Image (cartoon, coloured by chain):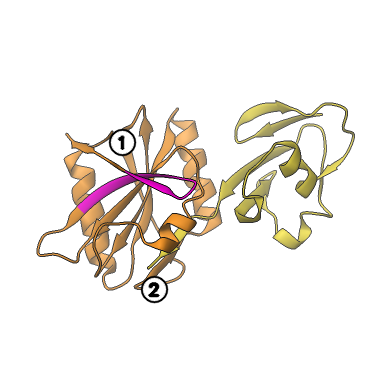
Chain colours: A orange, B yellow
Amino acid sequence: MLTIPQSIIEALIDHARNDFPLEACGILGGICSVVSEHYPMVNTDQSNVHFMMEPKEQFAVVKNLRGKGLSMLAIYHSHPETPARPSAEDIRLALTPDVSYVIVSLAGEQPDVKSYRITAGVVTPEPITFN
Amino acid sequence: MQLTVNGKPESIESKDSLNITALLEELKVKDALYVTVELNGEILERENFDNTTVKNGDSLEFLYFMGGGR
């Protein structure tokens, strides 16, 4: 289970909306499955169907988290026009171990935020607790 | 050889010199093709993995490619 403050959920949705029609992406950090940090990242693909993070930015975030005694808990991205389910490419490229994969969908009338654990191609939905 | 890997001390035994490709194998890093490496604060180009060696006291960071798509 991943716990995400309501303020960060709203920030994720804002990020997805602001970057629409492109995919937005970023990293969530915290400790013991409780998210406390939100890092919007640049989608270097600048695409509405793909995202890719800049390694320099990734390293900076990981070091920043480590300096706070925290860890990367989740990688998130938006699906501007498709449901909050990982695509085949999302699954294939879910390479970072021990993190959640959060997807923000803007496809419906209301934004939808879902989390998954993805290990060796196996996708397991993960409940999100909002606090 | 003593290294710092992702902020943690790592001891590589019986190695005087090791290139990045061999180090990734030594550390049993999975899917190494998708790993970006930073050595002492500098991101390495993948084509330089074989000709870049690490030495005692070096600091390395490994991160996986983060991306996806439809």
- Relative to residue A46, is residue B56 drawn left or right? right
Nearer-N-terminus badge (2/1): 1
The chain containing the residue under callout 2 comes to: A
Residue at position x 90%, y 34% from top?
A: B16
The kind of secondary structure element at disc 2 is loop
Q: Picture coordinates of residue B8 (x, y %)? A: 62, 28
Query: What range is drawn magenta here?
Result: A113-124
Label 2 to label 1: alpha-carbon separation? 27 Å
- Would you say residue B24 sits in the magenta stretch? no
Answer yes or no: are tags 2 and 1 on the same subunit: yes
Q: Picture coordinates of residue A45 (x, y %)? A: 45, 70
Q: Amino acid at mark 2?
A: Ser
Q: Picture coordinates of residue A6 (x, y %)? A: 17, 41
Q: Amino acid at mark 1?
A: Val
- Would you say residue A119 sits in the magenta stretch? yes
The label on residue B57 is: none
The label on residue A47 is: 2
Q: Is residue A29 above or below residue B38?
A: above
Q: Picture coordinates of residue A131 (x, y %)? A: 17, 34
B23 and B52: which is toward the camera? B23
For the residue carrying disc 2, how many other residues have a C-alpha within 10 Å: few (<14), some (14-19), or many (20+)? some
Residue at position x 70%, y 28% from top?
A: B10
Question: Hey, which quadrant is residue B14 in on the image?
Answer: top right
Task: Residue under label 1, please give it.
Answer: A35
The chain containing the residue under callout 1 comes to: A
Question: Hey, which quadrant is residue B62 in on the image?
Answer: top right
Q: Main secondary structure of the magenta part?
A: strand
Question: Can see residue A42?
Answer: no
